[in-house]
Amino acid sequence: MGIFEAVILGLVQGLTEFLPISSSAHLRIVGELFPSLGDPGVTFTAVVQIGTELAVVIYFRHDIWRIIKAWFNALPFGPWKDRSPADPQDARMGWIVIIGTIPIVVLGLFFENAIDSVFRNLYLTALMLAIFAVFLGLADKYGKQRLGEHDLSMKDGLILGFAQSMALIPGVSRSGGTITVGLLLGYTREAAARVSFLLAIPAVLGSGLYRLVSDDGSGPQVGTVPTLVATVVSFIVGYIVIVWFLKLISTKSYLPFVLYRLILAAVVVGLLGAGVLVAQ
C-alpha cells in the first residue's frame, strides 16, 4: 500500500465509522477497487479504527472522565473511597460499558477464523448492508424514542452489547447495529448514538491492540507507515464527522443512510457480477 492509498482508506474510515453504514464494509470494498491493493485485511481495519476511536475519546473526554470517576467512587473498596460522592447514573454507565463489551469480546474470539475469512465475503457484505438498512429504517420509523441516555438499564446495555457484536460481519455497522436496537428499545436517536459511541471505545481499542499483538503475518500485510498515515487521517476526519453527525440526528431521520445502504448493496452486487470486485 502506498501513501495515496493509505490516505484514501483513512478518509473512508473517518467518514464512515460513526455513520450507520459500516466502515469495515467500505474499507473492504474500496480496497478491492485499487488493483494493486485488494482486501486490506482485518488487522489493518482494526488498527485504523483506533484512529477514529481516539477521536471519540477526545470528543467525549469530559463524559468519559466523569463516568470513570463515578465508577471507581461507587466501588465498596479502594483508596479513592470518600474522596467525592459517586453519581449513580454515571457509575451505572460505567458498568453498562463493561457489561456491554463482553459479547463482542467473547464472540470476536470464538469467531476469529470466520472474521478473517468467511465474514469478509462481499456477497455477505452486500446482504448485510441491505438487511440492516431495512432494520434501521423500521426502527427509526416505529421506535418510540422516549428514553434518554440516563434511562439505560444493565439489561438494555447487554442487549446493545450483542447488537454491537453483529458488526463483526462487515456490512452490519457497529454504530448502525447498536443504534437500530437502541431505537427498537425506545431510546432517542441522540441517546442511541451516544451510547453506541461509548460502547465502542473498549471494543475498538481492544480489537486494534489485540490484532497488533496477535498478527502472525499470514494475512494481508500493509506496512507500518501506510497504516500509521491511514490511522492519523481517520482520526482527523472522524472527529469532524462526530460533531456533524450528532447535530444531524437531532433534527433529521436516518432515511438517507437507509437509502445509501440499499444503493451501495446493489452497486456491490453489480460490480461483483461484472467482475470488478472479487467476492473473497
Image (cartoon, grey):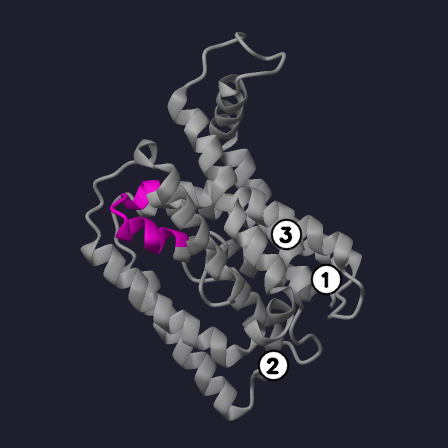
The span picked out in magenta is: 178-191
Q: Judging from the image, what secondary structure is the residue with disc 2 in?
A: loop
Q: Residues within 10 Å of mark 3 (few under 14, many from 20)?
A: many
Residue 100 vertical position relative to residue 68 in the rendered view, above or below: below
The answer for how far apart the CA atoms under marks 1 and 3 are is 24 Å
**Residue 48, percent from left and from top:** 64, 54
Q: Judging from the image, what secondary structure is the residue with disc 3 in?
A: helix
Sooner in the amino-acid sequence: mark 2 or mark 1: 1
Which residue, given by chain and number where applicable, does mark 3 sit on? 207
Q: Residues within 10 Å of mark 2 (few under 14, many from 20)?
A: some
In this rendering, the label closer to the viewer, 1 or 3: 3
Instruction: Check disc 1 and give the amino acid type.
Output: Ile
The answer for how far apart the CA atoms under marks 2 and 3 are is 22 Å
Instruction: Check disc 2 and give the amino acid type.
Output: Gln
Give the total number of marks visible in the rendering: 3
Which residue, given by chain and number where applicable, does mark 1 sit on? 3
The answer for how far apart the CA atoms under marks 2 and 1 are is 25 Å
Sooner in the amino-acid sequence: mark 2 or mark 3: 3
Instruction: Check disc 3 and give the amino acid type.
Output: Ser
**Residue 165, percent from left and from top:** 49, 56
**Residue 38, percent from left and from top:** 66, 76
